[in-house]
Structures are given as structure tokens and as C-alpha cells.
Image: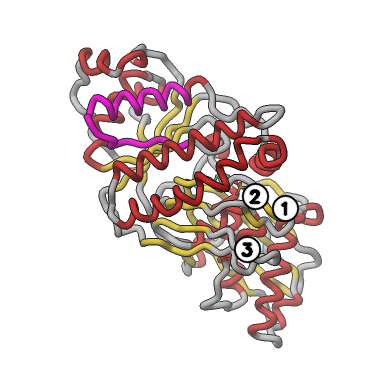
């Protein structure tokens, strides 16, 4: 009789509006500062993971986006699985599945080439799927997701999520809590603008280590700026105050990249097209007479924009006018939630955006239009499984 057990789940990515950058403990992945992020809808962007446990498996194996990885040397993944098993054993000491090896298969529904941070979705999906597999309910999984990748702990809930740095050396108080769910601010939209650039050079892990050990600005950021911004951001979200929300988001992104440039040697993540996007957003807001669009950049050149629904058509039509590209010509410029372009953006409007109004071809690959979404979900339909009856990727 086949005793194997299987679970398949999906989990979202998240985009920080107050950035996590720097660790106080590298092994436990404890951050030096609090951070806040928005969880994006899994309709557009998610990781999907199937895990099966079977007494017939001889070793634990994993496949990521169709390629088998080396489990033995993947210390973060091993640590996550070990910690999850420990927790499961505490809950049900007689669970014999805990002795069985695992087959883990994970895919992202967005192209790796898009250069989007996939580790947050991937590790939150791993942890959530393991919890489903072992029947762990009502436990805070965020300290375990954090062991895979810090930002992963913020993907275990929907809406806006606050990861508290905690002060304990063992990290049990470094947990993520939901500030509000995805329906709290329904007008909010998100654009991921995938730019035409090569992959990032320095990983987040290495970049944050270099920044925290060499940048003097960094200390000012974590001691003074972030604590104030966390308070102000929580208030802006609670009040659905886009002006404050947007300004804090942009300022925090700018300061994070300023600290990266202050590292020695500097960590450069934004490219000239990223800087141009930032200038365009400022021009757009000035023209509108209010802050209605906000950019933020992670450890790469892609732009993430938070904006209100009423601005999406104008902003995207303007981007298409500034950055014509093959995808636009083919009607594939915007993926995700469909939009109707405005019929025309006047030349006067474009000129009014100041020094940023020249046209450049092929700088943007495409835009993903999405909104806030919920945390991970289990998919019960066996058709959804990424593993076949033989325990191998389908
Ligand atoms: C710039 O969570 O990828 O996206 O904990 O070393 O795995 P590790 O780093 P990771 O860092 C994310 C950094 C960031 C900012 C953020 O998401 O808060």
C-alpha cells in the first residue's frame, strides 16, 4: 500500500515599502531593523510547491523551476526542514512521516529572467507546504520562513505585513505580523516594471553584509531613520494616506540604495533606466500636484510602483509613450490585470514632466499590473500536484 503523503501550495511575493537590509545574526537571519511590505496577489506572481514524503524515498531531493538542486549543500533549506520537523514532532511525536525523506518540487509562475526576488515566495511556500504536510495548524511559522530568506517571513500573510526585528539573541521575537489584510485599501495597485537589463550582480545576502560592515550612513539609517519611518508608515497605512505612504516608500528606497552606494566597494543595484523611472515618477507627481505614484527598488534595476487605481491608465500610457518596445507593439506591454490605455498623452504633458521627457526604445520589457493579495493557500485538486505518482516532477 502506498503510504506517501503529499501537499501542494502557492505563496505570494512581497515588496517592501520600508526595506530590510542588514542582519544582526547571519545564521538565524535576524535583521537589524524592522521592515514593512505589501503582499502581492498570487493571481499574477507566485511560487507553487509540491512536497511528498514517502517511506520509499532514499534521499531528500528538490527541483526548482525544472532543475534538480543539490540538497546536501543547501544549508538554508536543510535548516528550514530540520526546524519544521522539530516543531511537527513536538505537536505529534508519533507522526511516522517525520522519518521519511522528501521530494520537493517548486516553480515560479513568473520568468526567472524577470529578475524578481523569488526567494521570499519560494521559502514561504516551502514552510507553508511542510506545515500542511505534517498537519501543523495555528503556529506562527514566520520565524521558520525567516531561516530560509529573511523577507520570506513577510509572505506568510496577505495585505501589509510588519516584520519586527526583535531583541532576543535566539530570535523568537523576530516575527512578522499582519497590519491589515488585502481588502483594507482596495484602491491600491502595484506595477512591476521589468526593465531590459542583465541580472543583478551582488546577491542581497552579500550586499547587506558588505553594507552593514562598511557603510557609515547605514548606522544612521537603522538607529534614527527606520524606527521613525516604521511608526509613520503604520500610521499612513492605517489612515490610507497615499501621500505619506508614497513619500515614505520612495524615501526609504532612496536611502537603502544610498547606503548600498556607501558600501565599500559600492553595491550598485539601480541602473540608469531605474534612475530615469524615479525622475519620471517625481515629474508625474509634480504635474498632478500631489503624490499619487511611488517607486521602490529592491536589489536590482526593476521598478516597483505603488499607485492608486485611478492613476494606472494615465501612468501606463505615459510609460508606453516614453518607452516604446516590442511588447507594446505586440499588445503584450501590460500583463496581469488588463488596462485600457488613454487615447493619447499630449506632447505638452510629456514636456511638462521636465528633463525626463525624451523617448527611448526597448528600455522596458513589460509591466505586470497587480494588487495586494492574500497569504499562501493549499491547492486540494490532485491535478495541481507538480509531482507524478512516481514521486518525480511531472
Ligand atoms: C532588498 O530576504 O533576499 O528585497 O535574508 O539574505 O535571504 P536574505 O535576504 P532577502 O533580502 C531582501 C532585501 C530587499 C528588501 C526587502 O525585501 O525588505
Q: Earlier in the sequence, mark 2 or mark 1?
A: 1
User: Can you give x and y, in whole percent of width and height, for residue 312 in the image?
Assistant: 27, 36
Residue placed most toward the observer, 367 or 59: 367
The CB of the residue at mark 2 lies under 8 Å from ligand 1 = no
Chain part drawn in magenta? 274-296
Horizontal arrangement in the rendering, residue 264 relative to residue 357 (left or right)? right
User: Can you give x and y, in whole percent of width and height, for residue 115 in the image?
Assistant: 56, 36
- Which residue sits furthest bottom? 94
Q: Residue at x 52, y 58 (%)?
A: 163
Quadrant that contains the C terminus: bottom right
Label 1 vs label 3, nearer the camera: 3
Query: Label 1 crowding class (10 Å Cα cut-off): few <14, some 14-19, many 20+?
Result: few
Q: Earlier in the sequence, mark 2 or mark 3?
A: 2
The numbered disc on residue 64 is: 2
Majority secondary structure of the magenta segment?
helix
Read off the residue under disc 1. Answer: 26
Proximity of marks 2 and 3: CB atoms separated by less than 8 Å: no
Q: Residue at x 39, y 23 (%)?
A: 279
Check if residue 210 falls in the magenta segment: no
Amino acid at each position: 500500500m502506498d503510504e506517501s503523503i503529499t501537499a501542494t501550495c502557492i505563496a505570494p511575493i512581497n515588496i517592501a515599502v520600508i526595506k530590510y537590509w542588514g542582519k544582526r545574526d547571519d545564521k538565524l537571519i535576524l535583521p537589524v531593523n524592522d521592515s514593512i511590505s505589501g503582499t502581492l496577489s498570487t493571481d499574477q506572481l507566485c511560487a507553487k510547491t509540491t512536497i511528498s514524503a514517502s517511506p520509499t524515498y532514499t534521499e531528500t531531493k528538490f527541483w526548482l523551476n525544472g532543475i534538480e538542486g543539490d540538497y546536501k549543500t543547501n544549508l538554508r533549506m536543510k535548516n528550514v526542514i530540520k526546524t519544521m520537523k522539530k516543531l511537527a514532532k513536538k505537536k505529534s511525536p508519533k507522526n511516522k512521516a517525520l522519518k521519511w525523506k522528501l521530494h520537493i518540487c517548486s516553480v515560479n509562475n513568473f520568468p526567472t529572467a524577470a529578475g524578481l526576488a523569488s526567494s521570499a515566495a519560494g521559502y514561504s511556500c516551502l514552510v507553508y507546504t511542510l506545515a500542511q504536510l505534517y498537519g501543523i495548524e495555528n503556529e506562527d511559522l514566520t520565524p521558520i520562513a525567516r531561516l530560509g530568506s529573511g523577507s520570506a517571513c513577510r509572505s506568510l500573510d496577505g495585505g501589509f505585513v510588519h516584520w519586527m526585528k526583535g531583541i532576543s539573541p535566539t530570535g523568537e521575537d523576530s516575527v512578522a505580523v499582519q497590519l491589515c489584510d488585502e481588502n483594507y485599501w482596495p484602491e491600491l495597485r502595484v506595477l512591476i516594471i521589468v526593465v531590459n537589463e542583465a541580472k543583478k550582480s551582488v546577491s542581497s545576502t552579500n550586499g547587506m553584509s558588505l553594507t552593514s560592515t562598511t557603510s557609515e550612513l547605514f548606522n544612521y539609517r537603522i538607529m534614527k531613520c527606520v524606527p521613525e519611518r516604521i511608526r509613520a508608515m503604520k500610521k499612513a497605512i492605517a489612515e490610507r494616506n497615499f501621500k505619506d505612504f508614497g513619500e515614505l516608500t520612495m524615501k526609504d528606497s532612496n536611502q537603502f540604495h544610498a547606503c548600498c552606494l556607501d558600501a565599500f566597494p559600492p553595491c550598485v543595484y539601480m541602473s540608469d533606466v531605474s534612475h530615469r523611472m524615479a525622475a519620471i515618477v517625481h515629474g508625474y507627481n509634480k504635474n498632478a500636484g500631489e503624490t499619487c505614484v511611488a517607486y521602490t527598488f529592491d536589489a536590482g534595476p526593476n521598478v516597483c510602483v505603488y499607485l492608486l487605481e485611478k492613476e494606472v491608465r494615465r501612468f501606463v500610457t505615459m510609460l508606453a509613450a516614453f518607452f516604446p518596445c516590442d511588447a507594446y507593439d505586440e499588445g503584450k506591454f501590460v500583463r496581469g490585470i488588463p488596462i485600457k490605455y488613454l487615447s493619447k498623452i499630449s506632447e505638452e504633458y510629456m514636456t511638462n514632466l521636465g528633463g525626463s521627457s525624451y523617448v527611448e526604445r526597448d528600455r522596458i520589457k513589460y509591466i505586470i499590473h497587480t494588487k495586494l493579495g492574500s497569504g499562501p493557500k493549499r491547492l486540494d485538486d490532485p491535478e495541481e500536484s507538480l509531482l507524478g505518482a512516481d514521486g518525480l516532477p511531472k
